[in-house]
Image (spheres, rainbow, N blue to C red):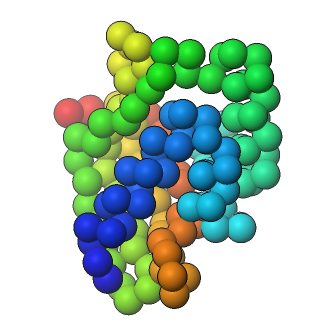
Amino acid sequence: MNREDLKQVRENWYAAFFAGDVERLAQIQAGNFTVITEHGVQSKKSQIDSISSAKRSGSWFPQGGRKHDTELTIQDSGGSAKVTGQGYSISGQSKGPVVEFSEAWEWDGTAWRVVNLSYGVARNQN
């Protein structure tokens, strides 16, 4: 596994998310992609639809946004990787809460695809 390739795809995925680039998100996310939060589970289609709707209404990160990892660990095992850590988002001048996250990534033979993202407010904030 090329860790740098995975890190770059991951950065592209987050940039697409904050930009609301649903076409790019759809390319990077596996068909069975899910997001798990304290609010429940969201499918890829549901996530893409809600981002598209928020963009149309002008409420999707209107000042832009980005993420900042404060901790990051990558555990690889052949064609898959688990990325865990803590971080926060920044939108305009606003900093979001520190969250703990876990991402499951798979190599499909040609590219890294994210299969799952799970996150919630960190219990031990750094």
Please provide percent x and percent y for residue 72.
26, 54
Q: How many marks?
A: 0
The quadrant in which residue 70 appears is top left
Please provide percent x and percent y for residue 88.
36, 32
Q: Nearer the viewer, residue 90 or 40?
A: 90
Up/down of 34 relative to 125, above or below? below
Outermost residue to the top: 93
Q: Is residue 38 visible in the rendered structure shown here? A: no
Q: Is residue 63 visible in the rendered structure shown here? A: yes
Up/down of 118 relative to 61, above or below? below
Tell me which residue sits at (67%, 45%) in the image.
22
Please provide percent x and percent y for residue 64.
47, 22
Please provide percent x and percent y for residue 80.
44, 80
Tell me which residue sits at (51%, 82%) in the image.
110
Residue 56 relative to residue 71: left or right: right
Tell me which residue sits at (71%, 44%) in the image.
47
Tell me which residue sits at (72%, 54%) in the image.
44
Residue 57 relative to residue 117: left or right: right
Q: Quadrant of the C terminus?
A: top left
Q: Nearer the viewer, residue 44 or 26?
A: 26
Residue 67 relative to residue 110: left or right: left
Q: Quadrant of the N terminus?
A: bottom left
The quadrant in which residue 83 appears is bottom left
